[in-house]
Image (cartoon, rainbow, N blue to C red):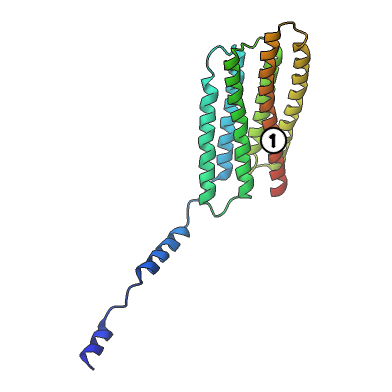
Amino acid sequence: MTDSESKIEGSAPSELPKNKASFLSHFLRVFEPKPKSDFYALLVSQAETTLKGIEALEAWLATGAYERCQAVRDREHQADEQKMLLQTKLVESFVTPFDREDIYDLSVRLDEVINAAKTSAREIEALNYCPRDETLDEMSRTLTEGTRCVFNAFYNLNRNLTEAAHQAFMARKCENRFAKVYRQGMRELFELNDFKTILRTVEVYHTMDRIAHCIDVVAEKLSHVIVKIS
């Protein structure tokens, strides 16, 4: 055996080219098992924050809305962070408990509820409006009740679909009840002779009506998702 043949026979296997080794490393990282994200829990947490924000709006209105409504702002910021976390988990996850587009839509539409509540608080502050009528109290109570039904629907999404569907239905019923309160309040409002009060109150009623609409939208989406996963 020649010296050159001896060297070839005793040499170590050649290493992978750097580009192939890099590709293999990337491939293994991509398909490395990751901890599963609990999307049901993430949605429930966001729904709970939204409910607390609507409750804070109701409490603020009940006390006369004299101070800056910081509590609603804080809940809106918290809900934004929860929405972004959920979206990040969606990007990272290969498998989701149900359609990822539906998960995304539920989170976004839920976020619109607390956004509308913050807008309402800011509008009331800008108008320097101190509520003194029973209509606004009834509106805020109805909104809180509707949001609580939305929360209950999210909570039961992976526990009891029948109850989840019922709670989503009740949330939509709250929106219908809000509409009746809204119409009655507008009729009573235009019996006044104070133009400034009428103008400011109409603006506030409109912002509250926007919250009710957002609650109805997320409840309708919940009903749609429940039918799909049943």
Q: Is residue 69 left or right of residue 193?
A: left
The answer to whether residue 7 is above or below residue 131 is below
Q: Is residue 184 left or right of residue 214?
A: right
The residue carrying pointer 1 sits among few (fewer than 14), some (14 to 19) or many (20 or more) residues within 10 Å by Cα, namely many
- The residue furthest bottom is 1
Name which quarter of the figure residue 219 lies in. Answer: top right
Where residue 103 sits in the image (x, y, percent)? 61, 45
Residue at mark 1? 217
Where residue 165 sits in the image (x, y, percent)? 72, 39
Name which quarter of the figure residue 206 lies in. Answer: top right
Where residue 161 sits in the image (x, y, percent)? 69, 42
Q: The N terminus lies in which quarter of the figure? A: bottom left
Q: Residue at x 23, y 88 (%)?
A: 4
Q: Is residue 144 left or right of residue 71?
A: right
Name which quarter of the figure residue 152 lies in. Answer: top right
Q: What kind of element bears circle 1?
A: helix
